[in-house]
Image: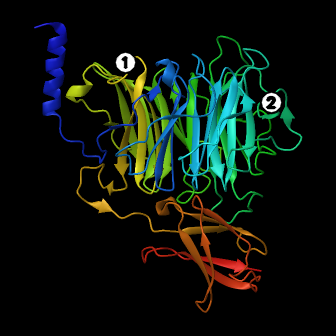
Amino acid sequence: MSQRSLVAALLLAAIAAAPADPTGWQDEVLVAAGSRVSSRTGLAISTSSGAIHVAGATSQCPQDCNFPWYCRSLDGGLSWSTAVVIAGGPIVWNDNAIALEARGGTVTALAPCQQTIYRDVSTDNGAKWQGSGSMGQGSRPALTSLFGSRYAVWDDDRYGAESTEIFFKRSPDGGSTWSPPPGQGVPPDNAMRLTYLPGRSEEADICTELPITQEAPPPLGGFIVVVWADNCPGGPSADFDLRTNWSGTGGESWFYGTSGRPVLATGGDSRYPAIDCYEAVYPWTLHLVWQEGGNSICYTRSTDRGASWDSLQWIGTGYHPDVVADQYGVHVVWWTHGMYTDVIKYRRSTDFGTNWDREVQLTSLQPSRIYSDSRWPKITADLQGRHVVFGDSREAGDALAVWYKQNPNVHRAGGGQSAGVVAAEPASVAVWPNPTSGPVFIHLSRTLGEGVSVVAFDAQGRVVKRLICSGSEARWDGRDESGRRLAAGVYYLRPEGLDSGARTQVLVLR
């Protein structure tokens, strides 16, 4: 028997002996013929309005797919649309990057081509795209959203190869037009420069946080948080550390100035950060993962918006992690070298970063996967569950074809080994400022999805206003259905048409 045949026989034996996956992850599905990925930043996933959106970028495929591409699923990931070209021109070797954000039926994509970042927007949930236009100079963009606005960060070496900096722009219309805060743009693309540090600032990620607690609200109703890797003071031998910064003014000012705040002094090389928060459970709390010292996947948590951080936690061995937080906890994915192939790994913390369930291998051995590699995972979460996309070589050779896996919203007690099921978090509404004499921002917990109506009623139980939340968010000016301003007093907001366990929020109008 040849060595290759012996390896195959051993793998098939391992498959036969392996128990069924107890964690609830479903089998992977090929996203689209021709979909390819060849780098950590070359794949993105988002969800909105009942659709799963996936986009990618690679230079390692035939010329007809050598462009940023997009496809979607409208049936929970079972089938996918044909990949279409979006956002910019042909991908070259160092342009393997894309960012994607979907909210309220508007889908925004950013992709670089030869140091120009192009934007593209769909306002009908991915059915049609407007066409690309440039919005910045640089590479490796990251996107987030808040109340219909989009916020983007990226890195660029316009000041020299060893002087890479982080830049920022915002869009008030879902990504069609972009600009810096007034008077803060720098040439050549009129972007706001976030970092003024010696050395290289790069690999930025961004998220938004809503102030569920009754703190003084920011003007736009939420906070923007940025994290990046930085090798200050620079030089070829300098290790990278992580830094973070946040803004409560829509990016006009940043709490830690132009240098940010160090996360943790690890003594090693900290790269490829990813950040998320889930403020409906733990306000002000940030969840951060990164690759440390070559091949360690690490996690830390901040409960004060980055002023301090918990001790480093080792999650696993591997490369290029991604993180998402939802009502069930914190979820981390990464890829690592298996016995014969590269595989995707996953871990979950149901208490939001204190303790962690056992490691799970998502790309389990199957006869069709012998000698195929899985890399570059991305994860997101919504009403339906956790969604992961990754590249796998079984269909594409050196450029990995894109596959999708889902973990439906069923939380199994005991790390998935028990048959017991924990009920989902009750539906809830958060409002701020509260009390208020002006407009109020409304946020639905992620368990509800999008397009849900919220009913406002007075102390006598009379309905005064119904609001449709776009992207789980809404803004109310305190007027009733006829447009008249409501009298000062106590009012109540509650999700409409949901289970009886939905929580009612008290709102005081002055």
Answer with the quarter of the image where residue 195 lies.
Answer: top right
Q: How is the image coloured?
A: rainbow
Neighbours of disc 2 within 10 Å: few (<14), some (14-19), many (20+): some
The answer to whether the residues at label 2 and label 1 have Cβ atoms under 8 Å apart is: no
Toward the top, the furthest residue is 2
Q: Quadrant of residue 347?
A: top left
Quarter of the image for the C terminus: give it: bottom right
The single residue placed furthest to the right in the displayed view is: 183
Nearer-the-camera pick, 92 or 251: 92
Precedes in sequence: disc 2 or disc 1: 2
**Mark number for residue 78?**
none
Res. 397 mark: 1
Q: Amino acid at mark 2?
A: Asp
Coordinates of residue 326 in the picture (x, y in percent):
48, 53
Q: Secondary structure at mark 1?
A: loop
Residue at 65% x, 82% y: name it.
491
Q: 96 or 196, which lies in front?
A: 96
Relative to 56, 106 lies left or right: right
The disc at residue 189 is: 2
Q: In the picture shown, does residue 459 fall above or below 378?
A: below
| Vertical side of 209 occupied by 404: above or below | above
